[in-house]
């Protein structure tokens, strides 16, 4: 069963990745490759990253290993995101695509409500049962949600708040492709209650219609990351 699901996942990701590349949100590449480097003195500034001289490009610039390894989900939300973007694969620079693996603990492991400001996400479930959804923009704020099983695919539109939760009794695993080399992520609770420096509690008290002491308590609870 796992082998069948893995085949479905690989097939779906390869097919969907080609679609994402052709309609990527990032600017189109200006040359065959633009491998990211950290030293601006030896490159040219293009599409947000400096480019390695093509003569020195190697296979390792386009390689990452380890997405087959489960991650420890022992954290407050019970999930871990393993990103594979331009920071892990320099060759993704200007390519307009990236990938993540998400591990979920049993009995409620959650990838909490968050948004990707620069990417649409397409997710495929390999193992477990996930309750997923996104919320449309104002004024409707409509929840669009579904329960997913191994082999199921779901799309989260760019910029919209979305989430996934393991509603099964066993570990769950999903892979997702995103239409940006650097999609960014804003976890709503962490950003609002765990910002640095903290947002003035009076602002959050009025925005969320909460007691000031409740806001201060929530601010003391956030700041951790699940990736």
Image: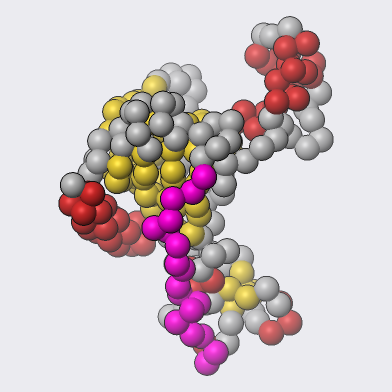
Q: Which residues are magenta?
A: 55-72
Residue at the location (23% across, 44% down)?
A: 151
Residue at the location (62% across, 28% down)?
A: 189
- Dominant secondary-structure state across the stretch colored magenta: loop
**Relative to 188, is 13 above or below?**
below
**Relative to 21, is 115 above or below?**
above
Where is residue 206? Give x, y as percent: 72, 12
User: Is residue 41 shown left or right of residue 103?
Assistant: right
Name the foreground residue: 120 vs 56: 56
Residue 212 among magenta residues = no
Where is residue 120? Give x, y as percent: 42, 46
> How many numbered marks, from 0 up?
0
Quadrant location of residue 28?
bottom left
- The residue furthest bottom is 55
**Relative to 27, is 52 above or below?**
below
Where is residue 194? Give x, y as percent: 71, 32
Name the foreground residue: 114 vs 175: 175
Residue 61 among magenta residues = yes
Residue at the location (35% across, 34% down)?
A: 170
Residue at the location (36% across, 45% down)?
A: 174
Where is residue 44? Give x, y as percent: 64, 79
Look at the image and name its color scheme: secondary structure
Name the foreground residue: 184 vs 216: 216
User: Is residue 162 shown left or right of residue 21?
Assistant: right
């Amino acid at each position: 069963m796992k082998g069948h699901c893995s085949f479905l996942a690989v097939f779906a990701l390869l097919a969907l990745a080609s679609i994402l590349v052709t309609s990527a949100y990032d600017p189109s590449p200006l040359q065959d490759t633009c491998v990211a480097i950290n030293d601006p003195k030896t490159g040219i500034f293009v599409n947000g990253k400096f480019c390695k001289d093509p003569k020195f490009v190697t296979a390792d610039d386009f390689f990452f290993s380890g997405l087959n390894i489960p991650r420890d989900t022992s954290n407050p939300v019970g999930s871990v995101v393993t990103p594979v973007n331009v920071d892990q694969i320099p060759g993704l620079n200007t390519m307009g695509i990236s990938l993540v693996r998400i591990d979920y603990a049993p009995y409620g492991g959650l990838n909490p409500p968050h948004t990707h400001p620069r990417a649409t996400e397409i997710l495929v479930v390999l193992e477990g049962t996930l309750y997923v959804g996104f919320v449309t923009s104002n004024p409707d704020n409509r929840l669009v949600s579904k329960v997913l099983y191994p082999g199921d695919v779901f799309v989260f539109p760019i910029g919209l708040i979305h989430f996934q939760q393991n509603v099964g009794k066993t570990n769950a695993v999903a892979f997702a492709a995103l239409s940006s080399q650097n999609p960014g992520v804003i976890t709503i609770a962490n950003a609002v209650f765990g910002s640095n420096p903290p947002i003035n509690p009076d602002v959050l008290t009025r925005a969320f219609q909460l007691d000031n002491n409740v806001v201060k308590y929530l601010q003391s609870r956030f700041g951790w990351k699940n990736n």
